[in-house]
Image (tube, rainbow, N blue to C red):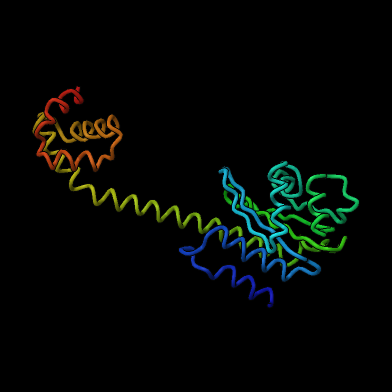
Amino acid sequence: MPESEQLGRVGRESAESAHPGRRLSELVEQAARCTSDCCGASGMVSDCGTERPAAVTHPDLAGLVAVQLRSGDGPIPAALERGEPVDSADLLREERWPAYRAVALDAGVRSSVTLPFRRAGLTVTLSLYSFRPHTLDGAPHGPARALGDLAATCIVRDRSYRAALTELDQLGAALRSRPVVDQACGMVMHVLGCDADTAFTVLRRISQGTNRKLSDVASAVVEKRGRGLERELVSLSG
């Protein structure tokens, strides 16, 4: 498949259905196919959180990612720290990363390169592997780099989209609860003889003190028409 078609395929999926794991799966599959002498690939998303979505083209490669996360040593941690590609032309003669080296050689991997792509507080790493030494030298400048750039941009866009949807849901819930909150404020104003700002503050203090949503507190006040709450309202308004 031409590089332009591969890039288009990564970018076409809507943000509504995209998930980091799915983006990574597409990235590693396409990067492995378009890189000469590549026997497989892995990808991972790292940010300030504890979750690190990852994907591999073959189950055997999962161990190469896992050993680096456990030990904190290897091409992926090094690429995350430096922000630039990290490679090993021949793992048989490599002196760095002993744990990673052992797992890689056991899987038949002789060389690897890890490319980091930083965007808006997160980093996507793309690791390419080969059964032969000295075969991935051009990978940091090949089509895999363009695929990684686009995938990282898409993952950031997807996160922004999901955050916007969450914010809209919260706003919608707030708008739906507004009428009952206004009703409850009116009842509190009547009971306490206070203004609207004070009534809202009282409802909010009840919400915080009882660890209930403001809308639930307001619904309870409206349902009871304020009856039985006079003493509680007066104590909380002081």
Compared across the picture, whether 190 is left or right of 36 comes to: left
Q: Position of residue 21 (x, y in %)?
A: 57, 59
Write the residue at 69% across / 47% down: 80
Write the residue at 24% across / 43% down: 215
Q: Position of residue 54 (x, y in %)?
A: 62, 55
Compared across the picture, whether 194 is left or right of 166 comes to: left
Is 211 placed above or below 1 here?
above
Outermost right residue: 93
Is 92 placed above or below 5 here?
above
Q: Quadrant of the N terminus?
A: bottom right
Is 220 placed above or below 155 here?
above
Figure quadrant of residue 106: bottom right
Q: Position of residue 150 (x, y in %)?
A: 62, 63
Write the residue at 58% across / 62% down: 23
Figure quadrant of residue 22: bottom right
Compared across the picture, whether 204 is left or right of 76 comes to: left
Q: Nearer the viewer, residue 60 or 23?
A: 60
Is 229 placed above or below 6 here?
above
- Total marks in image: 0
Q: Position of residue 134 (x, y in %)?
A: 87, 61
Outermost bottom residue: 1
Q: Quadrant of the C terminus?
A: top left
